[in-house]
Amino acid sequence: MTSTSSLAGKRVLITGGSSGIGAAVVRRLAAQGATVAVNYRSDQEAAEALVGELRDSGCAASAFPADIGERTQTHELVGAVVSEFGGLDLLVSNAGIEHFGALETITQADFDRLFQTNVAGQLFITQAAVAAMTDGGRIVLSSSVSARLAVRQHALYAASKAAIPAMVRNLAPELAERNIAINAVAPGATATRMAGYAPNYVHPALADVPFPALMRSMSALGRLAQPDEIAATVTFLLSPEASFITGTTIEADGGWN
């Protein structure tokens, strides 16, 4: 596939790229001419099917397994991508895990699992990617609108995602010394498998309200985002058009109240 896009020829790693928002990012970047590394943890079949779809369309893509919650694996992942692609220009840290649960049910294992993937995983994949990047690299991490919302039984997940805006804000001046920009996207409720958990944890007083009606009351646009709408924001932050943006978290939330 030939592309005149500003991302043509860029080598990009997308963690958690086999489904949902990650897969939408993969497709959008590949369509713009980037060479894409699709990371997955366990769903090899989905990752390889996505890579096959892209290759059939003339795009350059490969699948790479790794658990982003393990620091050693994140560094090995970046090493494998660099070895195959000859370098790394862009990183999209999309891998993450959801959690709903009342305070009294939260365990140390729950905390460790959430923060190891959603916080430490994003820090260490950034560490590994920066070491491999030349000047001009761009990085997009994954936060959530949950970081600023009060949602019933969502404290652990929200806390893990709230760490990301602080991370990008504080890494920005350090990485700017190497002409590398780092930002984050905070999606609102999006039509992915993870969104399926939400209706089970609304306030009991709203238990009988149909979820679509609840969504209409909670956001200006009144609907779930489609994964490609979030991917569009990610793609913008990777592009030269975002050259003066770093240390920022963009909320793509449909006007969530």
Image (cartoon, grey):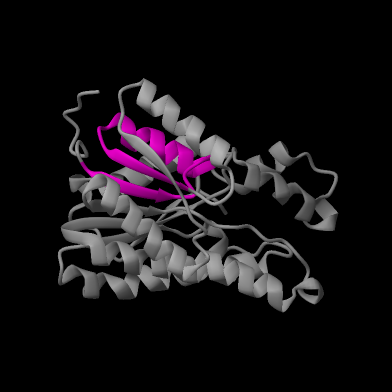
Which of 94 and 206 lies nearest the eye of the viewer?
Answer: 94
The correct choice, above or below, for 43 with respect to 74 in the image is above
Determine the residue located farthest toward the bottom in the rendered image.
Answer: 108
Q: Quadrant of the C terminus?
A: bottom right
Q: Which residues are magenta?
A: 10-39
Residue at coordinates 20% horizontally, 24% vertically from top-left?
2
Q: Quadrant of residue 196?
A: top right
Residue 95, percent across and down? 50, 54
Q: Residue at x 49, y 61 (%)?
A: 68
Please report the residue visible at 27 percent of the width from the left and 70 percent of the height from the top: 172
Query: Can residue 225 be seen in this snapshot?
Result: no
Q: Residue at x 80, y 43 (%)?
A: 209
Q: Residue 77, position in %: x, y?
A: 39, 57
Whether residue 129 appears in magenta in the rendering, the answer is: no
Relative to residue 5, is residue 54 drawn left or right? right
- Left or right, 236 with respect to 9, comes to right
